[in-house]
Image: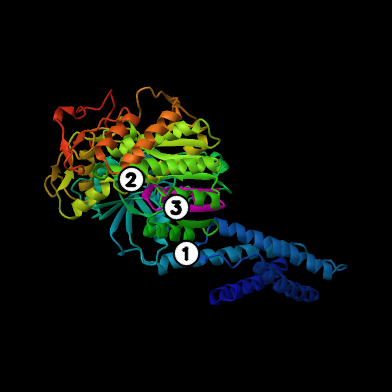
Amino acid sequence: MFTRRRLIVFISDSLLIFLALCLAFLLRFDFTIPSQQLELFFECLLVVMIVKPLVFIVTGFYNSLWRYASVQDAVEILKGVTLSSVLAVAAVFFLRQFTPIPRSIFVLDWILLFALLAASRLVWRFWRETYVISRSGEGPRTLIIGAGEAGSLLFKEISRQPHSAYNVCGFVDDDPDKKGMKLHGIPVLGAIKQLKSLIIANEIEDVIIAMPSADGKTIRQIMDLCKNANVTFKTLPSIGELIDGTLTVSQIKNVEIEDLLGREPVVLDRDLIGGYLTGKRVLVTGAGGSIGSEICRQVALFGPVKLILLDQAETPLYEIEKELLAKFPAVRILPLMADVRDRDKIMLEFEEYAPEVVFHAAAYKHVPMMEYNPAQAVMNNIFGSINIADAAHKFKVSNLVMISTDKAVNPTNVMGATKRAAEIYIQALSRGSNTKFTTVRFGNVLGSSGSVIPLFKEQIANGGPVTVTDKRVIRYFMTISEATQLVLQAGSMGTGSEILVLDMGDPVRILDLAEELIRLSGLTPYEDIDIAVTGLRPGEKLFEELLIDGEGILPTAHKKIKVLAAVHIEMAPVKEELARLHEVAQSNSIDELMESLKRLVPEFKPAYSFLGEAPHTFQRVRPDLFPPAAAPGSAKVLPLRK
C-alpha cells in the first residue's frame, strides 16, 4: 500500500470522498446548507472520511493500474463505493438514532462518488494515451488485416506502449459494412483484394494479420496479393494460444511455415485429460528433446503433483527444468539424469519415484544417422523402450504412452524398423499387464530436432543452395504443439495395447516447403536462392505411410485420432528373437543384426545392403528397387502454393 503512486491515488480518492459528500449536501439543500443541518454534515463527513478510505484499502482498491482502466475496473469501483456507502450510512444512523436524516443525501453521495472515482481513472487513461503515448511517426507504417475482435485488441495493446513498435495507419477487412468506418479512430481502408494498392498508396512497411483463426490458405492468399510489395508480414498467435483473451505486442511474430500449413486448432477434452494427469506423478523420458520438452509443458498445465524429467543429456535437461520452474512454480519438478538403455538405473528410478503416468519420448530419430549406427538404434529405440515398458509393468504404472512414428510402417530404414519392433513388444506385453499401454504414431513434426525446417533456414541464411533429396518426396507434417496435445488426448483414450494414429492431414511436397521458406525470407526461389536435388539419403523413402497391411483403422471420440484394430502378438517368439538381437547388437555384428531385425519386423525392407568388409558403409541397390514415384492409393498432395 505504501508506495508513492498508491499514496497519491489514496490521497486523491480521499479528496473525492470529501467533494462527493459536500456536493450531495449542496444539491440536497439548493447550495445553501441550513445551520441546523451543519452538525449532521460534519458528523457525516467524519464518518465517511474514516469508513470509506478504510473500505477501499481493505478491498484492494489500489491494486489496479489506472493506465489500463476498463469496464471491469468500473465494476470494481461500483462494488467498493456501494459497500463503503452502506457501511457509512449504517454508522451515521447508529450515531443519530433518534434524529431524522434526509435519505436523499446518501443516494446523491453514492452516485457522485462513483462518478468522480470512475471519471478520475478514465481521465488519466485518456490523458496518458492521448498525450503521453505518441503514436504518430513512431515505428514502421503498419496495416492491420482484420477489423474484428483480434484487430481491436491488437490496436489497443499497441496504443498502450510508450514507444510503439508500430504506427498503425489503417485496417483492412472484407466486411463491406466496415468499409469507410473507423475503429478506435483508425479508418478501415478497404478489402483484402485491394491490399497491394493500399500498401503502395499508404507507403506501408508492415502488415499484421490479426485473424487468429485464419487457415494457411487465407494467409497464402494475402501474401500472394502482396508479391513484390516489399513489406514484412506478421501474424498473431493461434486462437488456442489466445484462449484467455490476452494479447501482448511481444506475441506478434513473423509468418512462419507452420502458419502456411494452416491446420485446424486442436480441440481437447480437458476434463478427460485432467482425469489421468491432475494430481498424479508423471514421468517423461527424453524430456530435454523437442517432443519430450513440449509434452512436459503441456502436462504441467494440468497440475500434476510431480513432474519427473528423465534424460541423459545434461544441458537440455537443465534448460527445460529451469523453464518449467519459472512457468509452473506450483508443480514439483524433478530432473533425473538417466539413460533408458541402463536397465538397472531405470528400475531403481521407477521403484523410488513410483510414477503413475509415463510418456516415453526418448528415441534416436534421425534416419540417416541411424543407418550409419544401427547397433545404437537397436539398443536405444528397442531395448530402451523395453526397459521403460518392463519397469512400467513391474511397478504397476497406470498409463504408459509411447511415441512412435509413421516410419515404423513398412520400414525401409533402421530407425523405422526399431520403432516398429518397440511397438511389437509393447503390444505383446500389454496382453498380460495391468498397465494401460498406448502407442501413438504420427509423422514429421515441424521445428523438432532433426526436422528439415531448421536445415532449410540455415541454408537460406548462408545464401543457399537449399538441398532437397528428391523433387517427388512428400511428408506428413504437424506442429510440435498440435502433436503433443493430441498425444495427451490419446493417452486418455486408450484402453490398452492399441496403436493410435494422429490425423496428419494431407502430405506436403518437401520441394514446395523449401520454395515457401525462401519466399518467407523475402527472397525468390531459383533466383536469389537456388534449390539443389541431392538424391535420397540412406534409408529414406519418397513417401511415408501410417498403416501396415492388416491394421484396420477405426474412428475414436476425437476426430483427429484414429485407432488401429488390435493385432494378436505372442510374447514368446518375440522375446526369443529379441535375445538374439541384443546379443548381435552388443557384438556390433551388423549383418546378423539386420537379419534379426528382418525376422522381428517381417515388413522391414532395407533400401541399402551392407558390405562385409566395411560394416558401417552402404552400397546403394538398383534404383528400380526404390519406392515408386507416386504415393499409394489416391493420397492428395497439399501444395503450399497454387
Q: Comparing marks 2 and 1, which lies closer to the viewer?
A: 2
Where in the figure is residue 28, as x and y percent of width and height? Answer: 72, 66
Horizontally, residue 529 falls left or right of residue 373, namely left
Residue 310, label in figure: 3
Say which label, 3 or 1, has the lower sequence index: 1
Horizontally, residue 491 falls left or right of residue 584, namely right
Range of residues picked out in magenta: 281-310
Q: Quadrant of residue 221?
A: top left
Say which label, 3 or 2, has the lower sequence index: 3
Mark 1 lies on a secondary structure that is: helix
Crowding around mark 3 (Cα neighbors within 10 Å: few <14, some 14 to 19, many 20+) is many
Amino acid type at image mark 3: Leu
Amino acid type at image mark 1: Phe
Amino acid type at image mark 2: Tyr
Where in the figure is residue 212, as x and y percent of width and height? Answer: 39, 45
- The alpha-carbon separation of the residues under discs 2 and 1 comes to 57 Å
Residue that label 1 marks: 126
- The alpha-carbon separation of the residues under discs 3 and 1 comes to 52 Å
Marks 3 and 2 in Cβ contact (< 8 Å): no
Between residues 439 and 226, which one lies in front from this camera angle? 439
Furthest toward the left, the residue is: 527
Tell me if residue 308 is in the magenta stretch. Answer: yes
Say which label, 2 or 1, has the lower sequence index: 1
Q: Can you say whether 136 is above or below 340 in the image?
A: below
Horizontally, residue 501 falls left or right of residue 431, namely left
Q: Can you say whether 631 is above or below 449 in the image?
A: above
Crowding around mark 2 (Cα neighbors within 10 Å: few <14, some 14 to 19, many 20+) is some
Query: Which residue is rendered at x = 35% and y = 33% of the image?
Result: 505
Where in the figure is residue 604, as x and y percent of width and height? Answer: 29, 30
Between residues 424 and 37, which one lies in front from this camera angle? 424
